[in-house]
Amino acid sequence: MLRMRAAALTTEQILSDDAQALIAAMQETMCAAPGVGLAAPQIGIPWQLAVIEDPAEFHASIPEADLEERERRHVPFHVIINPVIELLGDERREFFEGCLSVDGFSAIVPRARQVRVQCLNEKAEPQVIEASGWYARILQHEIDHLHGRLYIDRMYSRTFMTVENQIQFWKGKSIAEALSRLEAKS
């Protein structure tokens, strides 16, 4: 399921009791994990639907300088359905990224700094989201899931490691230092 392109939903499907129950279950699962996003294919449902939330309490243990570098801010809970993403500008950012579907591992992944996403919400209403920084990264990650891609398809392969190793050896160090020392771009 993780490698298949998910199917777009109709308005009737979005408004169905099944879809609404799925959204509630996905929100609960994402929060319990804990994670900042969850796509339907991650739980075996081949639909173009994802839930996203980056609660402020997740930021409490992150140094202010790291939050600023990542442009990470609170993102309230919301649903994206049938998203179409546009990468804005040429600026890319590289950070460690993980995934609930590849649990316990992390790697440095380049992503666009800014995106625009056209989608539907849980009421089948059209939405346009413009995001930058960490929120743009979350959107790209979740939309990748809807197209059958994982972060490991985009990562610098030499940076792939366990989360324990990332914390032990790279916590508090810059991404530039990690890339340089791991020769990730070669």
Image (cartoon, rainbow, N blue to C red):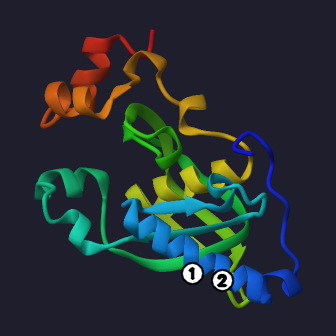
Query: Residue 48's quadrant in the figure?
Result: bottom right
Identified at 46% across, 79% down, the residue is 77
Is 178 drawn above or below residue 64 in the view shown? Answer: above
Q: Can you tell which quarter of the image residue 47 is in?
A: bottom right
Of residues 34 and 106, the one drawn nearer to the viewer in this rendering: 34
Front residue of 159 and 181: 159
Percent position (x, y) of residue 152? Answer: 54, 31
Near mark 1 (Cα within 10 A), the count class, few <14, some 14-19 or many ≥20, is: few
Residue 6 x, y percent position in the rendering:
80, 55
Number of other residues with Cα within 10 Å of mark 2, as a class: few under 14, some 14 to 19, many 20 or more: few
Location of residue 35 in the rendering, given as x and y in whole percent from the top left corner: 40, 59
Three-letter residue code for mark 1: Ala
Badge 2 element:
helix
The residue pinned by badge 1 equals: 24
From the viewer's perspective, tell me whether residue 34 is left or right of residue 52: left
Compared with 97, 173 (above or below) is: above
Whether label 2 touches label 1, CB < 8 Å:
yes
Q: Which image quadrant: the N terminus?
A: top right
- In this rendering, the count of numbered labels is 2
Q: Residue at x 25, y 13 (%)?
A: 181
Give the labeled residue for mark 2: 21
